[in-house]
Image (tube, helix red, strand yellow):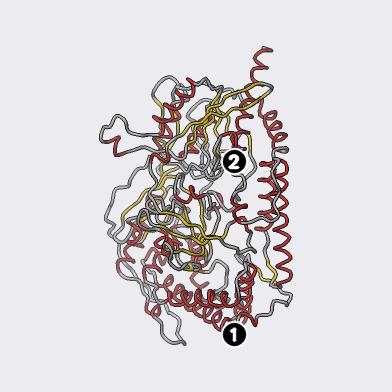
């Protein structure tokens, strides 16, 4: 339920205050003259006013927010603290509590001045790296016992240029060593890194004032929440360019991660998801059109990488990807070829299957409805087409077919479902409840709107479970939350994403502002924001919740609650949850796929938690051999338990082929779906036993 704000013309005075800019001692560059223009100044004033009047939280623009803007801007420009010196920061610090005043008066000069200094420092570092490479990578001594701090988010700023030089000497050495361990020859390494740094250097001169303005205003906007951001005129026509490539692209949600582009999630039924070769948290380091030469995109802006990835429907794009499962020390990459296409509605449509299980000495049949998205063919709906496709209509039809097959229960599979139509989440809820509220929307003015199912009678009243994971978001969380609050279904799987806010697009004189103006709440009054939906029975995580999910985003709005829309009723599942969890854990401890997933996740976490890396080649090779041995041992333990032949070595394709919640030909082959069915049958058995006693 999105309420679009009325567009108003904000008559604002433009004020400037004179601020000294730094004297230049080097040769002039194209960016030396970058200054804000009148349109950008007016847009910044409009953003200030819109956030003040319409953002959900309406937090004050004061000295405290100024500090957040300042720190966020520095983090956006130099997240690893490897460009600016302590001297630079000392100069910037005089503005630490003044950015609120600057923004209120339309003064963008400080933001531009900091960005120009950033470009100066970046040029110096790239020239240093190139000079080091010019001496030949074969001359780098990898026998020295020294380390590089890779987690530099809270590292002290370099005291001077000499300290930065030493840091960058180690950084270049590390890059060379990573490529060397990835089996690249010295000549190829030298050519690759030289080309990468020269390309980045050439791109500095292409910096536009709009790049600076966007970075600065977004540092301001995103102190309110991670989904409030400024969209430049170039991006305004396609406001989700930083979020989704679902149209004639690869179907992946991307974001910047220091100098890399990281995959956040895959669009269900999109080309990337169907390739089965890309996963959340993977890093894209190269892009090629068809069979053309691979373009190294490390250090590129996200929107520029997006432009390379997107292209005509039916054309091929090749991506060079470093899998997240490698850990931070292993830069071994793979090339994935994907044919671009628009995600078709029919490919996201609900699908059914029948899961056959043996439980307590008896054969059972459970209906499974896989739901990749909450969709509605708006065009056909508005045209009055009686056969328009929608989630609710399709699921209702599938439920009818499953009931004719006399299934003993139903599992709604919402794994990786990123959401979609809010109305469909409401309508789908109505298939399973008598009638009543489905979701609450609290607006910025405090008014609570109640969406409800007004049709009396539930279409399906039988036993039910809902399977979710960390990538179940938005409308998925609304539906799962309603099923949990009405005690209509067991919620099984992983903690969901936690996006419980509503955004709208507000046109500006220059670009657009996407801002958060409302928040979702479950009928129990609990927010879906930040915390998401917590399952009744947990499955082991398959992605790092510190990397993926709303709670991983800076300035994410908190979880809270409001007055419930329904009265609390007896929870029929509550008396059995402890026993259900105990039985699940006992089965999972013996299930090869569950054990493998948990152990592999633990190993990946250990690798991700490492703060430093050795620059000694012998040590690094020993560490890599050890990790590869552990990964191979995990895979072979799984294979042995399943009666399969062990592997002598673990190749990348083997790593990609390990069991996951996707890519299953039969529901019985999906360990997570099978276990969900067993839990639902456990409940039916326990509940029946109690009923007999009564």
Q: Quadrant of the C terminus?
A: top right
The quadrant of the picture occupied by the N terminus is top left
Answer with the quarter of the image where residue 534 lies: top right
Splitting the image into 4 quarters, where does residue 570 fall?
Answer: top right
* Above or below, comparing residue 425 to residue 600 in the picture: above
Residue 97 rendering spot, x and y as whole percentages: 49, 66
Q: Which residue is mark 1?
A: 135
Q: Secondary structure at mark 1?
A: loop
Q: Position of residue 314 (x, y in %)?
A: 37, 53
Label 2, secondary structure: give it.
loop
Q: Nearer the viewer, residue 277 or 64?
A: 277
Q: Nearer the viewer, residue 172 or 575?
A: 172
Q: Position of residue 337 (x, y in %)?
A: 47, 57
Which residue in the structure is indicated by mark 2? Answer: 494
State whether residue 503 is above or below residue 9: above
Q: Which mark is residue 609?
A: none
């Amino acid at each position: 339920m999105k309420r679009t704000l009325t567009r108003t013309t904000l008559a604002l005075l433009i004020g400037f205050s004179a601020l000294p800019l730094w004297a230049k001692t080097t040769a002039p560059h194209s960016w030396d003259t970058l200054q804000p223009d009148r349109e950008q100044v007016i847009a910044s004033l409009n953003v200030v006013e819109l956030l003040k009047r319409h953002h959900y939280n309406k937090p004050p623009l004061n000295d405290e927010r100024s500090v957040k803007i300042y720190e966020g801007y520095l983090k956006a420009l130099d997240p690893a603290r490897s460009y600016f010196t302590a001297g630079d920061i000392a100069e910037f610090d005089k503005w630490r509590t003044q950015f609120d005043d600057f923004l209120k008066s339309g003064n963008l000069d400080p933001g531009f001045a900091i960005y120009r200094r950033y470009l100066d420092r970046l040029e110096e570092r790239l020239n240093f790296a190139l000079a080091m490479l010019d001496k030949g990578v074969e001359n780098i001594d990898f026998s020295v016992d020294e380390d590089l701090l890779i987690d530099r988010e809270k590292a002290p700023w370099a005291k001077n240029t000499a300290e930065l030089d030493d840091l960058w000497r180690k950084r270049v050495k590390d890059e060379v060593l990573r490529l060397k361990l990835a089996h690249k020859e010295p000549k190829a390494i030298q050519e690759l890194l030289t080309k990468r740094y020269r390309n980045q250097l050439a791109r500095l001169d292409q910096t536009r004032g709009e790049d600076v303005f966007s970075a600065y205003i977004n540092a301001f906007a995103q102190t309110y929440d991670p989904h409030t951001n400024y969209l430049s005129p170039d991006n305004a026509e396609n406001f989700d360019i930083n979020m989704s490539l679902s149209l004639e692209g690869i179907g992946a949600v991307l974001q910047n991660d220091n100098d890399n582009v990281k995959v956040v999630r895959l669009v269900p039924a999109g080309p990337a998801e169907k390739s089965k070769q890309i996963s959340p948290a993977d890093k894209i380091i190269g892009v090629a059109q068809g069979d053309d030469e691979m373009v190294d995109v490390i250090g590129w802006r996200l929107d520029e990488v997006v432009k390379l990835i997107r292209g005509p429907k039916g054309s091929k794009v090749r991506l060079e990807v470093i899998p997240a499962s490698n850990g931070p020390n292993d830069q071994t990459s793979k090339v994935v070829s994907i044919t671009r296409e628009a995600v078709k509605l029919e490919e996201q449509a609900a699908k059914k299957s029948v899961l056959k299980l043996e439980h307590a000495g008896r054969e059972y049949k459970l209906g499974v409805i896989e739901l990749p998205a909450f969709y509605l063919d708006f065009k056909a709906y508005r045209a009055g087409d009686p056969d328009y496709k929608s989630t609710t209509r399709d699921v209702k039809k599938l439920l009818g077919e499953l009931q004719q097959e006399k299934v003993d229960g139903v599992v709604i599979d919402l794994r990786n479902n990123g959401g979609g139509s809010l109305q469909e989440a409401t309508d789908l809820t109505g298939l399973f409840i008598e009638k009543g509220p489905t979701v609450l929307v609290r607006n910025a003015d405090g008014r609570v709107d109640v969406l409800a199912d007004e049709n009396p009678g539930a279409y399906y009243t039988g036993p039910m479970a809902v399977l979710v994971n960390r990538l179940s978001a938005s409308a998925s969380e609304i539906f799962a939350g309603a099923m949990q609050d009405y005690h209509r279904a067991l919620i099984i799987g992983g903690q969901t994403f936690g996006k419980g806010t509503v955004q709208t697009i507000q046109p500006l004189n220059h670009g657009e502002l996407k801002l958060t103006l409302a928040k979702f709440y479950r009928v129990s009054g609990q927010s879906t924001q930040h915390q998401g939906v917590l399952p009744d029975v947990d499955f082991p995580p398959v992605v790092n919740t510190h990397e993926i999910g709303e709670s991983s985003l800076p300035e994410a709005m908190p979880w809270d609650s409001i007055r419930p829309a329904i009265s609390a009723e007896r929870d029929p599942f509550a008396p059995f949850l402890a026993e259900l969890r105990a039985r699940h854990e006992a089965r999972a401890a013996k299930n090869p796929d569950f054990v493998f997933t948990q152990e592999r996740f633990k190993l990946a976490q250990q690798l991700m938690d490492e703060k430093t890396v050795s620059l000694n080649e012998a040590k690094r090779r020993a560490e890599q051999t050890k990790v590869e041995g552990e990964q191979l041992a995990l895979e072979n333990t799984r294979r042995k338990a399943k009666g399969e032949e062990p592997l002598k070595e673990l190749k990348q394709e083997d790593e990609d082929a390990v069991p996951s919640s996707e890519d299953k030909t039969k529901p019985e082959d999906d360990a997570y779906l099978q276990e969900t069915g067993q839990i639902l049958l456990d409940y039916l058995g326990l509940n029946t036993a109690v009923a007999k006693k009564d």
